[in-house]
Amino acid sequence: METIQRLEVHDEKVLNWARELIEQSPSARMAGQEVVNAVRRNEIWRGDECLNLLAPEAPTSPIVRKLLSAEVGTRAAEGHIGSLQRWFAGTQYIDEIEALCMELLKKAFNVNYADHRLIASMIGNLTVYGTLTEPGDTVMTMSQPVGGHSSNRSDGPAGIRGLKIEDIPFDSHELTVDLDAFAEKAKAIQPKLVTLGASMTLFPFPIREMADIVSEWGGKIYFDGAHQLGLIGAGYFQDPLKEGAAVITGSAGKTFSGPQSGIILWDDPDLTQGITDTIFPALAATHQVNRVAALAVSAAEFIEFGKEYMGQIIKNAKALAKGLNDRGISVLGEHKGYTETHQVIAKVGEFGGGYEVANRLAEANIIVNKNLIPTDRPEDWDKPSGLRIGTIEATRLGMKEKDMDYIAELISKIVKNEDQPTNVKKKVLDLRRDFNTFHYCFEE
Ligand SMILES: *Cc1c(COP(=O)(O)O)cnc(C)c1O
């Protein structure tokens, strides 16, 4: 008999654990229960006992969570809003939900057009590349060590679209685009699209100047605001559409604090047909109407509380950055006030590197992620020297600047090996007992 060679990209240890558990379960029902148990373990640990400082995460409000399990999530609703443009009958209330969502998004972001059907922000990237480029076109995007994201690189949607990808020159000291170098390179290669997309994002970009440069040959700016979306909506980060970008996409589940999925926004009526036709029928069919309902209510919460919430997120990030830097853990962007977003990027190469430090922090129930920084090489993505720390969840739990200084103290004890993870973990548990309700949202 032929032996079957297994090829797993996933961690085989974990897969073997699952396979054994399933095989040893007396019934399929018990195997199903194991899933429920793992969900519950995560809920207790990450939900109640951890200090979650991952920059791309936000806890959704009680109403949003409830809507995510609503009956409407079992209904099929492909197509555009309105019975004539649907494949299925019986969608009148679904039309209402979707229209409310779209109009709330337009209001929250003060834009002419929005779409609610992207089940992930990655689908937004693909929508933009599908609408505004042809295979073989040249685009300019940000490389990973300076904050770029795979969605705009050869291994992501931009690559899948068959685009030629050139790096946007970046000033690693000022932590923004090197405008002179950009002008020179862009004029030489005349990219059809320039994507400003950063998952490590601290400061604004010279969008207006870049838009002027590329307009000479009809090029466009695409702002992938996955991270900054909420900050943009609340008026704290630059407003890319008003500064000359053609289109914005973003994650609904990062600063915006809605259900994980994507949002796309634009002002120019000439883009409407193309974008809408790319979303449906190319990239979305049944687009999870429960999620759309949850997104709509999170937009309403954002309209009500976004200004205060997003403002506190940035104040907290600045306080956390200063707290770390004052304790000898150097933070990028010190000369510019550290950050204008929810992110703090710490350099931990001298303390063991991002991977090692992030895992030590996780032993103390402090969750952050390893991150490339501009001095790292792209191929060192698995062993980078930075840490990315975000303040969305801590802020939604009601924490303020003084709490950030205390968190900086806890982090520094672990980073500098001045205390045992078990001791720091006790302090994290105490802190989480004091901060256990969500703010900036409607009551259930
Ligand atoms: C997180 C991120 C994405 C992908 O967002 P999802 O909502 O996870 O699909 C795309 N672009 C950038 C710059 C990101 O940081």
Image (tube, rainbow, N blue to C red):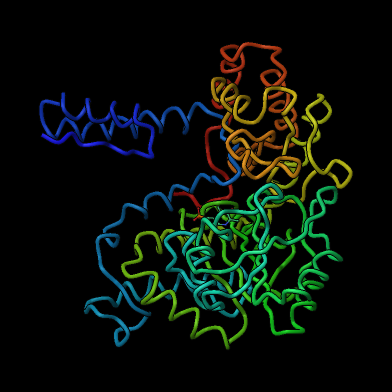
Between 331 and 91, the one lying in front of the other is 331
Residue at 58 percent across and 49 percent down: it is 440
- 442 left or right, relative to 378: left
Q: Quick check: which quadrant has ligand 1?
A: bottom right
The x and y percentages for residue 303 are 59, 63
The x and y percentages for residue 1 are 10, 34
- 25 left or right, relative to 172: left
- 250 left or right, relative to 308: left
Between 325 and 394, the one lying in front of the other is 325
Quarter of the rendering containing residue 98: bottom left
Where is 220 relative to 349, above or below? below
Between 344 and 169, the one lying in front of the other is 169
Between 340 and 436, the one lying in front of the other is 340
Residue at 34 percent across and 62 percent down: it is 288
Where is 108 relative to 12, above or below? below
The x and y percentages for residue 417 are 69, 14
